[in-house]
Amino acid sequence: MWAGLRRLERGGRVLAPALADAHVQYIDARDLAMWMLTSAENGVTAW
């Protein structure tokens, strides 16, 4: 299970994205990096 989902499962406060029409949305670079590495290892492609 993705670490972010484990965090949500535990409950409590979590950082969530801003509104879709916001000019900037902050992300956790560690989560993005883990997702990218896991996707690459599993052969996930954009198509």
Image (cartoon, helix red, strand yellow):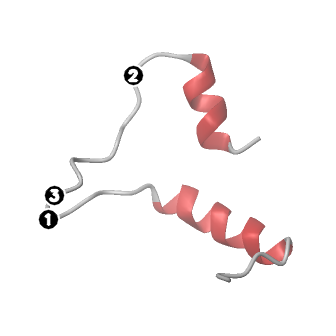
Q: Secondary structure at mark 3?
A: loop
Describe residue 44's horizontal placement relative to residue 4 as left or right. Answer: right
Label 1 residue SS = loop
State the residue position of label 2.
Answer: 13
Q: Is 12 in front, or is 20?
A: 20
Is 17 rendered above or below residue 30? above
Question: CB under 8 Å between callouts 3 and 2?
Answer: no
Name the residue nearer the viewer: 8 or 21: 21
The residue type indicated by label 3 comes to Asp
Give how far apart the Cα atoms at labels 2 and 1 are.
23 Å
Mark 1 burial class by Cα count in 10 Å: few <14, some 14-19, many 20+: few
Q: Nearer the viewer, mark 1 or mark 3?
A: 3
Q: Residue 31: x, y in percent?
A: 56, 56
**Looking at the picture, which amino acid does disc 1 mark?**
His
Residue at 60% in and 18% down = 10
Separation (CA) of disc 3 from disc 2: 23 Å
Q: Quadrant of the N terminus?
A: top right
Which residue type does callout 2 highlight?
A: Arg
Circle 2 SS class: loop
Question: Does residue 25 lie above or below 33 as drawn?
Answer: above
- Is residue 15 left or right of 46 when viewed as pictured? left
Tell me where residue 38 appears, x and y as whole percent: 76, 66
Residue matched to label 3? 21
- Identify the residue shown where x is 66% and y is 62%: 34
